[in-house]
Amino acid sequence: MKEEVIRVVVIEDDPMVQEINTQFIERVAGYQVVGVAGNGAEGVRLVGELSPDLVVMDVFMPVQDGLKALAQLRVNNEAVDVIVITAAKDKPTIQAMLRNGAVDYIIKPFQFERIRQSLESYRQYRLQLGQGGFASQEEVDRLLFRKTSEPAGRAGDAARETEALPKGLHAVTLDQIARQLAEESQSLSAEEVAERVGIARVTARRYLDYLVKVGQVRLDVSYGGIGRPTNRYMRVHKS
């Protein structure tokens, strides 16, 4: 099944930051920036025209700041989620943006890894809500608090190990990789895992090595063909 493309509008007044944010967002598989606005008023208009899934918004902007722009989006009943990326770190501003429904709040300066984590978490959030039907309390808790320590199914065994994850590893990505392996009937290489999950091969290798270390994945070495042997990974299914 083809992966959903999450359409994003960036609202940011600094042209250089616009470019950085756009590049960072589109480095994450499954995301596309469909519009860029230089202030809140322009951003609200653009959201009305383009109907994106997600807005990535600054707070400090001319004409209309992020606080007013987000409030206006809610008045307009726009069915869009918002991630805030801003230098504003005073608690009243943070509280105001969260009260108006921001799903994440990232303080400048930030690294790519932080926004990647946010976008992967948001994609998981959309997948969980888009399945229809009813939700259990456990599922609601995971949605509200981004909990991945007790997901349903066999993939959850790996996520239960995430309370003490090594630095640089994130529960959401670990859970995605574990789930991907759990769905496969045969072993995968790090490159194949990276392609399916939408991350770099070297990143996939780090998560796979961790899963092998904690006993959730089995490492097999394939010597077929000419050249270096290939490491392949298979989910360990516990009875």
Image (cartoon, helix red, strand yellow):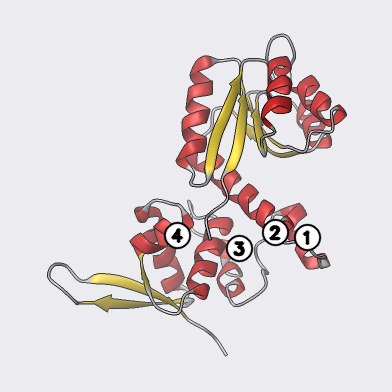
Secondary structure under badge 3?
helix
Label 3 or label 2, whichever comes before in sequence order: 2
Q: Residue at x 52, y 73 (%)?
A: 183
In-image side of 166 versus 132 (left or right): left
Q: Quadrant of residue 100?
A: top right
Location of residue 70 in the rendering, given as x and y in whole percent from the top left corner: 78, 27
Q: CA distance from mark 1 to mark 4?
A: 27 Å
Q: Where is 78 relative to 30, above or below?
A: above
Label 3 or label 1, whichever comes before in sequence order: 1
Label 4 or label 2, whichever comes before in sequence order: 2
Instruction: Provide the residue designation for mark 2.
Output: 128
Quadrant (top left/top right/bottom left/bottom right) for the C terminus: bottom right
Label 1 or label 2, whichever comes before in sequence order: 2
Residue 141 numbered tag: 1
In-image side of 53 versus 179 (left or right): right
Crowd tier of the residue under label 1, counting other residues whose Cα lies within 10 Å: few below 14, some 14–19, many 20 or above = few
Instruction: Provide the residue designation for mark 3.
Output: 163
Q: CA distance from mark 3 to mark 2?
A: 22 Å
Residue 196 numbered tag: 4
List the single residue furthest toward the left: 226
Q: CA distance from mark 4 to mark 3?
A: 25 Å
Secondary structure under badge 2?
helix
Marks 4/2 in contact by CB < 8 Å: the verdict is no
Question: What is the three-letter code of the residue carrying label 1?
Answer: Asp
Location of residue 209 in the rendering, given as x and y in whole percent from the top left corner: 39, 66
Q: Residue at x 61, y 34 (%)?
A: 8
